[in-house]
Amino acid sequence: MQVTVAHLKRGQRGIITDVSSIYIPLKLLEMGCLPGNYVELVQVAHFSDPMYLNINGTHLAIRKETALHILIDIL
Amino acid sequence: MSKQINVALIGNPNTGKTSVFNALTGLNQKVGNYPGITVEKKEGICKLPRGVKAHIIDLPGTYSLNASSLDENVVIELLLNKNDKDFPDVAVVVSDVENLKRNLLLFTQIKDLEIPTILVINMADRMSYKGISLDIPYLEAQLNTKIALVSTRKKNGIAELKELISNYKDLSITPCMNASEIDREYFDNLRKAFPNQLLYKLWLVITQDVNFGKTDRNEIDAVADFKTKSKADLKRLQQKETIKRYQFINNTLKKGQTIDLNTAKDLRIKLDRILTHKIWGYVIFLLILLTIFQAIYDWSSVPMDFIDTSFASLSEWTKNALPAGAFTSLLAEGIIPGLGGIVIFIPQIAFLFLFISVLEESGYMSRVVFLMDRGMRRFGLSGKSVVPLISGTACAIPAIMATRNIESWKERLITILVTPFTTCSARLPVYLIIISLVIPEGRFFGLGYQALTLMLLYLIGFGAALVSAMVLNKILKIKSKTFFVVEMPNYKLPLLKNVVLTVIEKTKSFVFGAGKIILAISIILWFLASYGPGEGFNNAEEIVKTEYAGQNLTDDELHEHIASQKLEHSFLGITGHAIEPAIRPLGYDWKIGIALVSSFAAREVFVGTLATIYSVGSDDEETIKNRMAGEVNPILGGPLFTFASGISLLLFYAFAMQCMSTLAIVQRETNSWKWPLLQLVIMSGFAYIIALIAFQLLK
């Protein structure tokens, strides 16, 4: 099974390995969601959705459905 | 020497761009619209050293030059069109010292357009706090620019920035990255096909989905020997461009910026642990809302009473000081009471905007979006719908414009359609005056009954919005790809200057916008109420004198009867009586009917209209509220504004769609008349039925 941002636990960090460009809006890439950058799960709302992330120093929230398309290696 | 320098302020959202704009221009600013679209255009004048003036435009916040919304489109359209009168001589890119990496993406794109560019690194006062140090000369060399370290909070660096702007001719226009690195072959072909055009500009024109009226996209399509790529290929290239840019930025910052994580203290983590907590987050949000409503009610009652009595005296004074005649009567009975009906609500509206701008400025609003997204999705809305729904409590028009950052069209359309249910500030005057008439004073656990009623009305508004969203979500068959990205900015203490400027600007536009309509309507109403056709009006004195001939009436009483006879037979009275059958089951008389009809221009007209109607012919110095309290129900006797008719009116205003400007903006944003007409018919029909049920049950 592929590990994605949706698998992170609160406070856990990972390194982004791949983003599938079909599902990920350009805007998210521009905010730093690119392979090689780190991602940390800061906080989750109910049912882990949406997810409050720190990607490469940028703090943002995305929905779980989007998080499922960001592949990572958990650190 | 007196030529103005055109300056464009550009930057990511949440970088304090507006603070820089305010620091540069102070009160020398105005807000308008870009022609043809409803994007807000902020511009101002700034005095530079040596007598030079700069014309400064605060462009909408954007993360890159790849536009995905109308607001962002404005930025590109200006930067690509050299013939635009606002085309910048110099671009000032505002960045936030804590998010330099991301902010520089936009900077490198603008540099590639070969526009002289200054980099402002804002919030420099937080550097030591965050353990950040910068090698400015190195960064300036790498980025081919001049850097101004600015702190709008500490008022540092603005003079240096002005100095840089006035010397813009010394700035290098060499790009810091070569666009053709993205795909050498493709860009070489592009260069061959259009040798005279700037390469990066061509690339932007090709890749933007949005339609550029003024730029030369058609030109590119017209050149047959140049093959544009497929959409998917273009998107892949844009992705590659972003990666390339980040590589360059990372390399630059590796040497130019050091962050000592040990000294970095993070308030964000501590605050977010509570404010975005699964339980406490919601509790705190509710408490904040509660405070706002209590404050709007309690804090503003003193200035409101003062304004109310002042206008009553002014009207009386006018009547006595000026020679009697049609003009004096128009002034004293039409215009002054009409305007009083709007001025009185300035305190409350200012408080409302104060709270909204503090919530926005502090960064808390994004947390609300985060907290509410999951719940809102159940209603077919997005977490981002919370911002329109909350700012809808000020005015539905900016709120509907604020839906633009909702990425999914279906979520956005539903938000647009239900936002007018939220209690806008124009409903507030109506609510306040009716509540003060029909709801008893007294307190319940420290909260006044009247404040609680007001809060309940706000909740009804939100409730109606949510329920209708749920229904729309079921009915509307729109497939649209949804994605949701919201930045969670750092918490910031709101800057007093920004908050004050927002409050002044919004209140001013509310008062003047509504003021114009109210002035016009009160003149029309005064005319209709002061003149009438036929016997009943022209011989009012005779008729009344004959009717009451046997009874020994005092002059005052007689005068009162004549006045009401005249009003009833005036044009206004006749119209009012014509519509009375439709509204009597709701508990209203013909005067309220007139106010109701004129409310379709704008709701806040209601109070002004009643004030005008009630003051025509009355001599006493009385406040609007006292006049309304004194009104007698023509059929049942007793006061006209009872608990039943009051509640019925409150509910009617809660649900009815009574604002022409909102309908116009919905038409514009949805690009169709279908949606605004649907809103008008369904909302007002529903309001009628609910008000009818309420009155019949309570009377």
Image: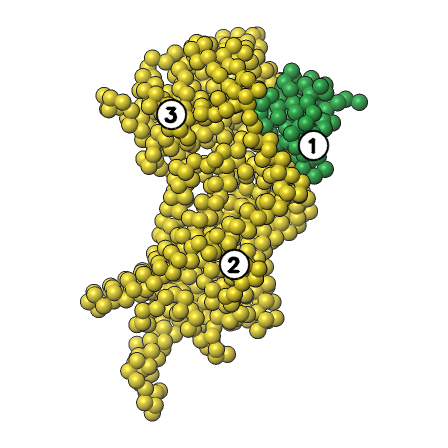
Residue at the extreme right of the image, as rendered: A1
Q: Nearer the viewer, residue B507 or B69?
A: B507
Q: How far is the residue under mark 1 from the one under mark 3?
A: 42 Å
Q: How far is the residue under mark 2 from the one under mark 1?
A: 40 Å
Name the tint of chain B in the rendering. yellow
| Location of residue A3 by image quarter | top right
User: From what the image shows, is residue B66 above or below residue B696?
Assistant: above
Residue at image coords 44%, 49%:
B351
Q: Residues within 10 Å of mark 1 (few under 14, many from 20)?
A: some
Residue at image coords 54%, 59%:
B446
Q: Which residue is mark 3?
A: B156
Q: To which chain does the residue with label 2 belong?
A: B
Tell me if label 2 and label 3 are in contact, CB under 8 Å: no
Q: Position of residue A28 (x, y in %)?
A: 60, 25
| Location of residue B486 by image quarter | top right
Q: Is residue A16 visible?
A: yes
